[in-house]
Image: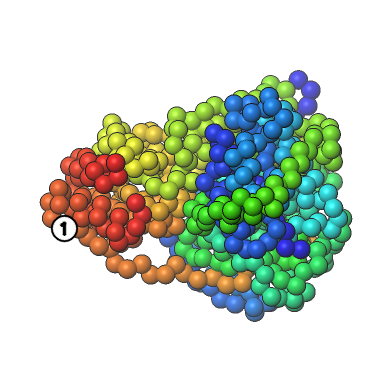
Amino acid sequence: MNQMLICIEIANNKLKRSSLELLSFAQKSGWNAEVVAMRRSDSDMDVTSNKSLPEDLIKILKDYGVTVIHTFMDPIFSKYNPELYSRAIYSLLTAQKPSPYGLLLASSNSQYKDFLPKVAARLNTGIATECSDIILDQKINARTIELAGEQSVKPVDGQIGNTESSIQVIRSVFSGKSISTVAFDARRPCIVLMRANQWPILEPLHQHSSSTENASISLPQILNHSLDSLEGGKDPLLVQLKEVVKGTSEKLDLTEANIIVSGGRGLKEAANLKYLHELADVLGATVGASRAIVDAGWCSHGMQVGQTGKTVSPSLYIAVGISGAIQHLAGIMGSKVIVAINIDPQAPIFQKATYGIVGDFKEVVPLLTAEFKKALH
Amino acid sequence: MGRSLKRIFVCLKQVPDTETKIKFQPDSSSPSLLQLDPLGVKWVLNPYDEYALEEAIQIRDKNPGAQVWVVSVGPKKRIVDALRTALATGADEAIAVDAPEILDSSATAQILFQVIQEEIALKGPVDLILMGKMAIDTGASCTPSLLAQMLSIPHVGVVSKLTFNGDFGWVAERDIEGGAKEIFEIEMPCLISANKGLNSPRYASLPGIMKAKKKMIQEKNTPTFVSHLKWLSATFPPEKPPVKMLTGDSTNTVVQLVQLLRDEAKVL
């Protein structure tokens, strides 16, 4: 049952970076991979023609070895609804019983974290979010995995798959203080939500196949599922999305950003955030904030990085005027490289940074911005 | 205006304080699995649950005759402290559900589901369930959505603003990526998970603390549950090499930094 279903995301008619990471993993795993895409707003998708997905996007999926593309293109799907989306994914996973899927894979973003647990509850299978890696086919007899505290197992809808191998995930716990290895029990499919920036993006295997080779790899089957085809598809929805209020930033969300420039109380006043925005613009980075300046009202809570803010995993995190309170560090320990710029040489952040500069941000940051500009453009 | 809001449940979790040093030991009942070493751990109420509790108290105060019930799942002996604090802060009744130290989200949801169902059968409807969007120890964020599904009630998660709709429901603002907000309409009975910014949690008052001391906390045994996830091992992140402090004047250090980022760290 080495088959996975991957939830892919499309923005501006392109696959999101996080989706490319998931596809790379699927390709490397050797598992058969199917994908599912929800209809986006009309502006993202050419819905006037019969084609629901852009040609070049289909080609990329094919080159990654995807065999089936499931779509939900009825207009109702263009508006997020946790009940509707969970019905859709549940229907796909249970179209055949027992489910042929060993794994449901998605990005650990706010939408999937919101509705995929509903799918897990209906399937009575495990779900792990904020994962940093997946280990497939550990050869373990599923029956010997101890189920701590379990009193009884009740099969539901015959969903227990026959498997000899366990799926394990790696995820950080206790605010980044520890890295745990967690094993799923025997029930399938396992639902795994991956943090962004954990896996390398690989070149699609079939990208450079010759035209004759390519011709023999048939295009993925595209199956559009209508609302009517869903189990309980016409049941009333008990929540309704009324409005989406857009955020002010066009950049990637902190949780997905590859480079982050973050500011703290050392900036002295809200107006000085402009130094960070200039630096971020040159780097293509997203701007973040410590709790101190969010609480001071300099910027919105959505920009907060840390224990009661966002947990980030960028390749590069530049902390300007941030002292390095443990609650802030909790949110950034997944960063590959941390640069600290602070006027106080005793600031705790220097203990956790990769590189440190002691200095006045008003002097250092503009010079750094100029230097990056030279190096990158 | 038909129905009135009668009972609000708040699901609370006790978590290790952030400053606590984390250590592990084998699970006494299943040695191949792990448990948290409780020695020296300072336990606090999960920060996001504080917003849920505050919201429940504010809603209760606007609805005469309504009650706030708090429920927590975990080793009975220690969770009663968190429940007593919640009572001192303003909750009306508390239930402690005995359970193992470490539970995955689904197991927690299954336990809460059974307890709430039992409470509904015994004492009538639960109109609103509030809880934090995420527990800071596991960071899973699954329990609210799992629990709502099990109870067959609608749910909006990561809510930073909740407004009564004048009838028997809410307008809930949910925080998503990029600082954007999704505005949902939802009818009770329902579950809402709280994000920071929903309100400003109050501290327990001295009279509240005194009153809570005498309050009886209901205790329940562990209901049946299935763990889908097993904690096999835990490591600590590898020790990072000491920081490389760049020296020299600013024109110099920035050049060094960019070069190191490009050539040594290779992140550019």
Question: A135 left or right of A123?
Answer: left
Question: B256 left or right of B141?
Answer: left
> Residue B245: horizontal and vertical position, in percent?
22, 60
Q: Residue at x 72, y 23 (%)?
A: B167
As drawn, A106 above or below A186: above
Secondary element at tag 1: loop
Residue furthest toward the left?
B249
> Residue B88: horizontal and vertical position, in percent?
57, 47
Looking at the rendering, which quadrant does residue A299 occupy? top left
* Local crowd size for mark 1, using a 10 Å CA cut-off: few (<14), some (14–19), many (≥20): some
Q: What count of labels does the image hold?
A: 1
Q: Residue at x 36, y 54 (%)?
A: B267
Q: Nearer the viewer, residue A238 or B37?
A: A238
Give the image's coloring scheme.
rainbow
Q: Nearer the viewer, residue B3 or A14?
A: A14
Task: Please give the residue where the numbered disc 1 appears in the rendered image.
Answer: B247
Q: Nearer the viewer, residue A210 or A68?
A: A210
Report in which chain the residue with disc 1 lies. Answer: B
Q: Residue at x 59, y 40 (%)?
A: A56
Question: B93 left or right of A326?
Answer: right
Looking at the rendering, which quadrant does residue A13 occupy? top right
Asked if residue B245 shows in the view, the reply is yes
> Residue A320: horizontal and vertical position, in percent?
29, 46
As drawn, A14 above or below A129: above
Mark 1 is on which residue type? Answer: Thr
> Residue A361: horizontal and vertical position, in percent?
22, 43
